Image: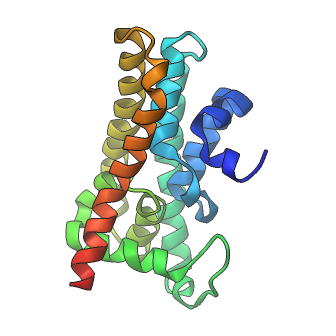
Amino acid sequence: MSFTDLLDPHKIILTFGLIGIILIIFAESGLFFGFFFPGDSLLFTAGFLASQGLLSLTILLIGTFIAAVLGDNVGYWTGKKAGPALFVREDSTFFKKKYISDAQSFYEKYGKKTIILARFIPIVRTFAPIVAGIGNMKYKIFFSYNILGGFIWTFGLTLSGFLLGKSIPNADKYLLPIIIIIILTSFIPALTHFFKRKV
């Protein structure tokens, strides 16, 4: 499987199945190398395929929710333990200090809500829990926002895909355009934040 295939939610699901989806959601939620995975479109596509009977909706919802919450927890404790060492670490293929800085700026602007809002923003969702750990956010507060954000993200996108598949005849015709819209929309908050900082 090529790198570009890893960005195609449909191919990911057909190749790796439910276990693959759950592992990818876990990785994207808190591991350095997970930032490039297409979490939003993956959840939506998985929900759509569940509506066609190709995946178990119950296992998909529960599995991705748990994976998202656990992934953020790993990110939080990585930030808590590694802390300032991350800012002196050399840039690599899977890690750039800029990602931490961008997530930190986003965190400073939105505070605790970042843990929820970041779920819907690629790259930021991977590094926001790390920044929460670096910033010594109280774990009890982090965990409550983590559960809420993980629930809204996984259940919201998965059920949206499921309902589309159930309610629109030949919905597979519209799947690719919808996925493209989801991907583009998910980058809007990050781009808006970036241009505001430039101004």
Q: In screen coordinates, is 162 left or right of 140? A: right
Is residue 135 among the parts visible in the rendering?
no
Q: Position of residue 12 (x, y in %)?
A: 66, 37
Q: In screen coordinates, is 112 left or right of 89? A: left
Q: Quadrant of residue 88?
A: bottom right
Query: Which residue does the image show at 38% across and 51% down from the upper left?
Result: 184
Q: In screen coordinates, is 110 left or right of 28? A: left
Q: Looking at the image, which is closer to me, 176 or 13?
A: 176
Q: Position of residue 53 (x, y in %)?
A: 56, 9
Residue 45 vertical position relative to residue 54 in the rendered view, above or below: below
Is residue 148 among the parts visible in the rendering?
yes
Q: Quadrant of residue 198?
A: bottom left
Query: Which residue does the image show at 46% across and 27% down from the upper left?
Result: 175
Q: Looking at the image, which is closer to me, 3 or 98?
A: 3
Residue 176 vertical position relative to residue 102 in the rendered view, above or below: above
Query: Which residue does the image show at 53% across and 47% down from the upper left?
Result: 38
Q: Position of residue 27 (x, y in %)?
A: 60, 52
Residue 41 vertical position relative to residue 105 in the rendered view, above or below: above
Farthest right residue in view: 1
Total marks placed: 0
Farthest bottom residue in view: 88
Picture quarter with the C terminus: bottom left
Q: Quadrant of residue 118?
A: bottom left
Q: Looking at the image, which is closer to me, 88 or 146?
A: 88
Query: Which residue does the image show at 79% across and 44% down from the upper left?
Result: 1
Q: Looking at the image, which is closer to me, 85 or 176?
A: 176
Q: In this figure, which colouring scheme has been used for the structure?
A: rainbow
Q: In screen coordinates, is 70 left or right of 124? A: right
Q: Position of residue 179 (x, y in %)?
A: 45, 37
